[in-house]
Amino acid sequence: MAVATVRQGRIIKGVAGKYSVRTKDGEILRCFARGKLKENGALYVGDDVNVEVSQRDCVITEVLPRSSMLVRPYVSNIDGIIIVVSPVPKPDFLLVDKLIISCIQQGIDSVLCINKADMQGVDELYEAAKKEYGSVTTVLVASAEDGKGVSQLKEIIKGRYYCLAGQSAVGKSSLVNALAGKNVMQVGELGEKSLRGKHTTRHVEIIELDDGTRIADTCGFSMFEIPLFDPMFLSGYYIDFDKYREKCRFRGCTHTVEECCGVKEAVELGEIPRERYERYLKLYEEFNKRWEKRYG
Ligand SMILES: Nc1nc2c(ncn2[C@@H]2O[C@H](COP(=O)(O)OP(=O)(O)OP(=O)(O)O)[C@@H](O)[C@H]2O)c(=O)[nH]1
Ligand SMILES: [Mg+2]
Ligand SMILES: [Zn+2]
């Protein structure tokens, strides 16, 4: 009987129960997963894994500890997220808020990329994004179409491992192609009726750039729930609220119904954008409802 050897590598692609694992010396192994690891959600693109290699097949037997992990998109061990929005489809800043919260939770970086700089409406979108997120993350404008901002983005993520995230058809795969300087990912079209995108990318895949940077292209999404925690702690993930917190009268102020709240005062003074604060209230409400129902 053939003896299996154990090799280590990183999952760079996963489609329908088959995984591509890249070993340290650059070989790509086509693998299946063993037993429990077959279950949905047990393996992530980006996972470092042990693979049993025999003459017959390659089987992933073990996942090594992860440094970070996201459920939307489904990736692990990333250093940061490139959050992509564009004038069309219509940007969803609540989704951006949630992605930034995920980054802070996971202790990873974020960059907000306004794509389709060649389109109308991008200046207004940049102004709005800069106002809302300028003190929270890096905001930059790019165009996968004409290359604007692509080298700046490449510089920000240089030598690290980032994933792209955002709605369908904002141009994530197009940006991957622009960053790679060649067409590695398939690009879709805008759905004519809804302008909501067609979900062209249906799997997660890691692309390695010529400077060693790695990026994961991911599937577009518009709905996403952050894993639940006590809503009391939600505002802690709004780092732009930090400097106003000390003016709150109550310790543990949630900045919702309390009197004498530094955050609410900052909203009134226009120092915290009202739209961002109102989305915070909405998310707080959502969390509260889920929290109350947490035991079923
Ligand atoms: N005008 C303009 N169009 C762009 C730009 N980048 C992407 N697009 C177009 O936007 C559409 C969607 O692009 P994709 O790259 O497939 O979008 P995606 O975010 O990967 O979409 P999913 O895979 O469905 O999540 C395509 O028609 C692209 O040609 C850009 O910078 N400018
Ligand atoms: Mg795509
Ligand atoms: Zn407060």
Image (cartoon, grey):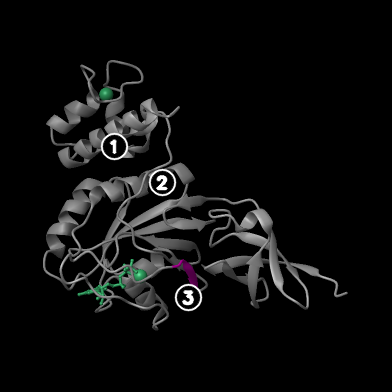
**Mark 2 sits on what residue?**
102
Rendered location of residue 9, percent (x, y): 66, 67
Give the extent of the magenta segment: 203-209
Circle 1 residues within 10 Å: few <14, some 14–19, many ≥20: many
| Quarter of the picture holding the C terminus | top left
Report the residue marked by disc 1. 283
Q: Is residue 134 visible?
A: no
Q: Residue most toward the right?
A: 1
Q: Earlier in the sequence, mark 1 or mark 2?
A: 2
Residue with the mark numbered 3: 209
Tell me: 150 left or right of 122. right
Residue at 18 percent of width and 66 percent of height:
195
Q: Quadrant of residue 139?
A: bottom left
Q: Position of residue 91 (x, y in %)?
A: 21, 56
Q: Secondary structure at mark 2?
A: helix
Q: Position of residue 153 (x, y in %)?
A: 35, 67
